[in-house]
Image (tube, grey):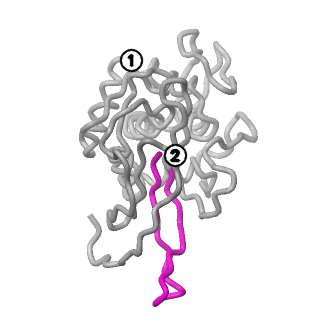
Amino acid sequence: ESIGDEFQYTVKGPRTAAMTHIVADVKNGTILVDKNATSTRPVASLTKLVTALVVIEHFNLDRSILITDEMIVTTTLARLKVGQSYTVHDLLILMLTESSNEAAEAFAVNYGRQRFIGLMNSKAASIGMHDSTFADPSGLHDGNISSPEDIFTLLKYIYENRRFVFDITADTLTNDAYGEVVFGELGNFNKVPGVENRFIGGKIGKTDAAQETWASTSCTSTCTSRSPAAPSRFMCCVI
């Protein structure tokens, strides 16, 4: 909870056809607009933000993981090779930038899949995501469900405690002690074309059950008629 942040808003809601959404200030928790914000639904690859928290807390980033057949699952851009080893660091970046389902599965299988998923659910509950349940590490499973309100809680937690995760998702990680990833230049599947506000971090997801999901933290200049040069605010948008 932020202390001493008394910024006031004049609210103008976004135009969106999304059935559930929330837009809020990540610093002071002010909700600008929401719709069905406690309704739960599949969240697709937004799941990987929780996966990343478990990885950071339970793996050494310089440790290697040997890829096995059971880690190879459906993914947008396949990069992992069975029989090769990759560091946790490199797999984490691959998962958070190109949304690799294979990288997410590699973490879970290596740790013990059910134990890993149990850690995901425990972590979510511990930070206040009480309407969320996770069934796999990638978001492919329809049983990965959450609400806009819970995803906002997740973004706020990452913003305040694990900014490193946002830095990876936004390609703004600098002075990385672990060096360049072995995959070469990676794409970034998290940014939305045409969104002008400065992207701090977040995730995009898409499955048949979830349709399209978006969780983003951005820096936006919020101005009022009394203050034409208002300070930058850090906003969360969850759809």
Residue 112 x/y as whole percent: 38, 17
Q: Earlier in the sequence, mark 2 or mark 1?
A: 2
Apparent side of residue 85 relative to residue 3 in the rendered image (left or right): right
Q: Amino acid at mark 1?
A: Gly
- Badge 1 local density, few (<14 within 10 Å), some, or many (20+)? few
Q: For mark 2, give the secondary structure.
A: loop
Residue at image point 64% right, 41% down: 189
Residue at image point 63% right, 51% down: 171
In the rendered view, tell whether residue 169 sits above or below residue 205: below
Residue at image point 28% right, 41% down: 129
Residue 154 x/y as whole percent: 37, 47
Residue 28 in magenta stretch: no
Q: Quadrant of residue 39?
A: top left
Residue, disc 2: 17
Q: Quadrant of residue 144?
A: top left
Task: Give the residue furthest to the top.
Answer: 69
Residue 69 x/y as whole percent: 58, 9
Task: Give the residue furthest to the bottom.
Answer: 226
Q: Which residues are magenta?
A: 216-239
Residue, disc 1: 112
How far is disc 2 from disc 1 in space, using C-alphas? 40 Å
Residue at image point 60% right, 52% down: 170
Q: Nearer the viewer, mark 2 or mark 1?
A: 2
